[in-house]
Image (spheres, helix red, strand yellow):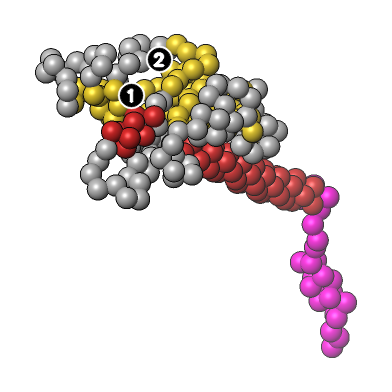
């Protein structure tokens, strides 16, 4: 009796086989497609994240510029009229209050939104910076203007002249406008004739709100733009005699 061992080994080996060349190529192709898809998704996520970062930075820069203008314009009309030794409110105190607080819009102006109030590229205002109750036109008139892709702050003259650039270098300003809100009021008080209209020689009280539009883009990529609007309520009413 004999055992055919060789036949048994042959039958066992006949079930062992590897990948064919075609199967290997198909596997590589499928794997490449999966990797390519994953890389595409990763690239889109990374690019989207970069866009969000750029937009946040642009918004932050414009918001900081707008906040500076907001805080400054709110101070228009502030005056330390009550001087040491005053017992009652005097004519001099009234003169001091009237000297500060005029808000003037200038530069390029137009009523672009048709609401009856013009929007201008420059604003001038004054307040009692040294708190002496005396108006100094050389040092206590301030302003902001749009010029050459930047916001400039002017603290030296009562004109919309060149000032110091307060815009971050990463940002280019594309629009800046100031508008006296149509809801602002000027009313006669005190020695008026009672007709409700502030006329020459009458004591007047002005309550004002300034609407500001600020728009900018990234200097390195103009595709990223942000537009901001703000309503600035001037804290100090302007109490004065109408010329």
What residue is shown with label 2? 118
What residue is shown with label 1? 181
Is 212 a magenta residue?
no
Identify the residue at image location x=35%, y=50%. 84
Separation of residues labelled 2 and 1 (CA atoms): 9 Å
- Taking depth in this image into account, of 225 and 93 the one nearest to the observer is 93
Q: For label 2, count other residues whose C-alpha is less than 10 Å away and answer few (under 14), some (14-19) or many (20+).
A: many
The reply to whether callout 2 and callout 1 are in contact (CB within 8 Å) is no
Using the image, determine if residue 90 lies above or below residue 206: below
Using the image, determine if residue 140 lies above or below residue 115: below
Helix, strand or loop at label 1? It is loop
- The segment highlighted magenta reads 1-23
Is 21 a magenta residue?
yes
Give the residue furthest to the bottom: 1
Q: Quadrant of the N terminus?
A: bottom right
Q: Position of residue 237 (x, y in %)?
A: 30, 33
Identify the residue at image location x=27%, y=38%. 90
């Amino acid at each position: 009796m004999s055992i055919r061992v060789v036949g048994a080994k042959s039958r066992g080996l006949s079930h062992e086989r590897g990948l064919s060349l075609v199967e290997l190529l198909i596997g590589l192709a499928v794997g490449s497609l999966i990797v390519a898809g994953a890389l595409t998704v990763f690239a889109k996520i990374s690019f989207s994240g970069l866009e969000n970062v750029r937009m946040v930075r642009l918004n932050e820069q414009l918001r900081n510029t707008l906040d500076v203008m907001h805080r400054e314009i709110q101070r228009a009309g502030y005056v330390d009229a009550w001087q040491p030794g005053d017992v009652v409110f005097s004519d001099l105190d009234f003169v001091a209050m009237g000297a500060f607080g005029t808000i003037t819009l200038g530069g390029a102006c137009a009523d672009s939104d048709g609401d009856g109030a013009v929007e201008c590229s420059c604003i001038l205002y004054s307040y009692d910076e040294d708190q002496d109750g005396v108006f100094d036109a050389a040092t206590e008139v301030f302003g902001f203007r749009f010029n050459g892709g930047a916001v400039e702050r002017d603290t030296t003259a009562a004109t919309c002249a060149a000032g110091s650039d307060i815009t971050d270098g990463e940002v280019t300003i594309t629009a800046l406008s100031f508008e006296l809100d149509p809801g602002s009021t000027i009313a006669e008080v005190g020695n008026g004739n009672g007709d409700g209209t502030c006329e020459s020689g009458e004591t007047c009280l002005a309550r004002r709100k300034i609407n500001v539009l600020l728009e900018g883009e990234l200097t390195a990529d103009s595709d990223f733009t942000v537009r901001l609007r703000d309503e600035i309520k001037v804290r100090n009413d302007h109490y004065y005699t109408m010329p």
